[in-house]
Amino acid sequence: ASKPGVALVTAGPGATNAVTGTAQAYSSACPVVIITGSVPLSSKKEIFHGVDDPDFLHKIFSPITKLSVRVERPEDMPEILADAFSTALSGRPGPVHVEIDDLTLKARVESAAPYRPMPRHSPGLDPAIAERILELLRRAKRPVIVAGKGVLAASAQEELAQAAEILAAPVIFPYDAIGVMGYHRRWCAGAISTPMGVNPFCVKLMRDSDLLLGIGLRPDAWNLEVILRNAPPKIVFIGFDDEQIRQEGAMVSCVADARLALQEIIRRLAPQRGAPDEAILAQIAANKQDMLQAFQSAMEPYREKTPLHFGLALEVLSRHLTPDTIVIGDVGSNSVWATAYLSRLGPHKFLGPGLWAAMGFTIPAAIGAKVACPEHAVVGITGDGAFLLSSADFATAVQHRLDIVYVVLHDGRHGMVEMLQHRDYGRAYGTEISPPDFVKYAESFGAMGIRVERTSELGEAFRQAFRAEGPVVVDVICEPGVPYVSPPNR
């Protein structure tokens, strides 16, 4: 989050097509400066790229950004852009929209102040509030930490791990904060809820605790409901927002940068570190093992079958992932398995589309990840329907010779929609799709495509894919309708 993304798009459809990505960035607290063209405010009706209201883009972007601003004088552009970058990075990061119309862009400027970057604003803990928090943490015998995506936004994963060790506290997290702590960490107890339901083990940890430390969570966010319903009476809430908003029900509540807050906790409490409760650690380890066993049991009947099981493809894929591999997930049944299962198999970085859940996320997100981190291996896991939604972006990956392995879990349908229709109405309608031959699709761009129809073919397919130069599509023909795995009730 120390460097914002920048998007430059045309007026009209270029801007409106960027609305979904901008809203997703807002939901995921990702800093982005999106610069759009626009029509002049003096425009007549039905101008090219316009509608009756020439100010419509500014109004569209206002609710889905931290700031939507229009450059009306060219000499104001340096200051407006500096403020845009500062705003995108400060407090709760997010997107900022800057609109520049054609006349302003082409205007001559006799004199203007040079561009000067503005600082980002990251509030630390108020000293008086910090003392109250530290005193409550010192007295806690069975604390639990609930870590939100504010920890990810502050790149404070290591500080979170250190704080968990010092406090001897299990760490649980909402679904949109998966990756805040790797499952290989001994204090990582998992996601509170997933598309498969609420995790009963996380609920038990909260109910058995004597203090809940919430950090990086947004006050009044919808995902707090299950947390507050099961939390102990003592709640310390270090929120993640742009304003000092108090969380109702918390004994101590404030808004602060997660990294700064965790560093203060580590600095002040590390000398008083006590012995961990081995019984809780044993419960966490056993629950992780139970969950993996549940996945294995669900996959076992499919090991010799064709089409093959989503989970078997991910199991073999995991053997080719290094600790630094960036794995991108998507939306759909493929995502349920990839997020819940694959993230447990290693410390690799798993990134998903977040709560906005824009289907087709994987292809462009993997491109962004590879451009930003060229030294890392990047794997995108998607379904056939999700791949088709953004398949045109595959051309960009090929054009720039980006080494990305795209794994298409191909079951010929919108599986999650089908499951929901069966659950709610007893039958499904309009969920089957007829995707192209993905191998030929990749080859038509000059890239490599590999088709996998049997479990025994997976190992060699992934070996070829990771050795190849440029993007590769591994088309895995999968069994439709494989059941999800519910968290064990330990």
Image: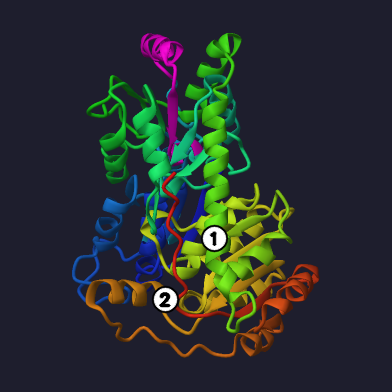
Question: What residue is drawn where x is 59% and y is 63%?
Answer: 366
Q: Label 1: few (<14), some or many (≥20) within 10 Å?
A: many
Query: Residue 484: within the magenta?
Result: no
| SS at mark 1 in the image | helix
Looking at the image, residue 479 lies above or below residue 267: below
Looking at the image, residue 47 lies above or below residue 160: below
Q: In the rendered image, which residue does mark 2 sit on?
A: 415
Q: Which of marks 2 and 1 is in front?
A: 1
State how far apart marks 2 and 1 are (Cα). Answer: 18 Å
Residue 415 or 41: which is nearer the viewer?
A: 415
**Residue closest to the far right:** 467
Looking at the image, residue 314 lies above or below residue 247: below
Q: Which of marks 2 and 1 is nearer the N terminus?
A: 1
Query: Residue 150: within the magenta?
Result: yes
Question: What residue is drawn where x is 52% and y is 20%?
Answer: 167
| Three-letter code, disc 1 | Phe
What colour scheme has been applied to the protein in the rendered image? Answer: rainbow
The residue stretch that appears in magenta: 125-151
Image spot of residue 266 (x, y percent): 56, 18
Image spot of residue 53 (x, y percent): 19, 66
Residue 230 or 213: which is nearer the viewer?
A: 230
Q: In the rendered image, which residue does mark 1 sit on?
A: 295
Direction from residue 303 to residue 48 in the image, left or right? left
| SS at mark 2 in the image | helix
